[in-house]
Amino acid sequence: MTNRTIFSEEILAAWCAKGDRKSQKYLYETYANQMFRLLLRYLGNEHDADDVLVVAFTKVLKNIGDFSFRGKGSLGAWIKKIMVNEALMFLRAKKQTELLDENEQIADVLDAGSKLDAEDVYNLVKDLPTGYRTVFNLFIIEGYSHKEIAEMMGISENTSKSQLKKARKKLQEKIIKTKAGYELG
Amino acid sequence: MNSDKLDKYFKEQIDSLKTLPVPGTKWNREASWDKIDQQVGDRRKVVFWWYLSGAAAIVIIFLSFWFSRFDSTSNKNPMAEQILELPAENEVGHFAENIISSEAVAEKENKIIEDIADKSIVVGKNHEAENQVPKNKRHSLVVINHLAYLPEQLSINQSEIQFQKPEPKKSNTESSSEQEIAIAFNRTYIIRSKNKDVAKEKNNGVELKLRIDLAMRSEADPPSGILSNRGR
């Protein structure tokens, strides 16, 4: 870690834009874990997450001059947006966004879910099929609308909705299986 | 189960882990930084060299402009560096004695001058002491160029007058944006920036006007100095 104290995201971004290496490393250290976890949730494996993190963070540092400060947290949100876009581009390039077509009923799994810790929940999402996972992440975690997701992924809004529905169902199934696993010992 | 509750549950659980490292990961954060730093560092070098070359270009342009200006003023007159400065006051007598030691010589000289163009160059009283320009304000090249024509003109057109050329020395000159002042032949000349072809005496009472054109022809109003026999 660097020994510098950064009092403002705006100042940190300005220093990074000037090419100050210490500030750039501070920025990386501040957001690296968060963004790696985000990418892992989208991409499903560490290798891909690492590759995309390097590409996306390089892009962040090269384009940080375009960042405009809009209050606390805006820098993180801006970086996160770049990460998500890069993850989607990566998935598109690998043609991993194939959408599954399953039609199953949603079961009540809340009680089962409550037995899982946060890491288990995280891993459940991470292990979803790519198409489900992407829509689930964008809609539930990042808060994008179906319209935005449709634009970002190049699909229709209805497809986005149906993928989300299927993602939910898949998660419920997994939770039930996990519950069964817990119960079986 | 209500899907909204499930969504909320998942979001809360995942957000709670937001900044925590992934447990059991093989991901090497420092190695990733090294890759990023290498790529950004290349860009840093490019930006650095871009700025450096830009600055160098500006300096080169400035220096070329400066030296071209210097050269152009020098090329106008090969004698640019040979500014004449009359000897000190105690030497003026010697100078005058050698050149125009008698009234007859002075009359002859002025007649020749008048025959040529009814013009002459005036050597008057020594103003050097009172018009001494501080050393740090000397060497105005424009003034030097103009004044350097004087001895050349005299030596070419007035060969019969065996002027003893004073030793070329840096002239006492002073330059400002509006005018340039130089002392030559113990007189103080003013050359206005608006009309650099004409040099006027600083003391208006003397009424000397020196015109210098491309043909290197010097003109002056009727002389009033010691070369003149008018009024004698």
Image (cartoon, rainbow, N blue to C red):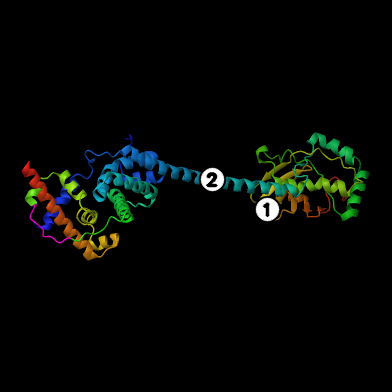
**Residue located 68% across and 55% down the image:** B194
Query: SS for tag 1?
Result: loop
Magenta span includes A104: yes
Q: What stretch is highlighted in magenta?
A: A102-109
Residue annotated with mark 1 = B193
Residue at horizontal 23%, vertical 65%?
A: A157
* B77 displayed left or right of B23: right
Q: Which residue is drawn at 87% across and 48% down?
A: B156
The chain ID associated with circle 2 is: B
On the image, which quarter does residue B197 sit in?
A: bottom right
Looking at the image, is mark 1 or mark 2 earlier in the sequence?
2
Residue B186: x and y in percent read 78, 42
Image: A2 above or below A108: above
B7 and A12: which is toward the camera: B7
Q: What residue type is labelled 2?
A: Ser
What secondary structure predominates along the stretch shown in magenta? Answer: loop
Q: Position of residue A80 (x, y in %)?
A: 29, 50
Quick check: B185 left or right of B4? right
Looking at the image, can residue A91 be seen?
yes
**Chain on which label 1 sits:** B
- Disc 1 residue type (three-letter): Ser
Q: Name the residue under label 2.
A: B53
Query: Horizontal and vertical percent for residue A121?
Result: 16, 47
Q: Nearer the viewer, residue B133 or A48?
A: A48
Mark 2, secondary structure of its residue: helix
Neighbor class of circle 1 (other Cα within 10 Å; few <14, some 14-19, many 20+) is: some
Q: Residues within 10 Å of mark 2 (few under 14, many from 20)?
A: few
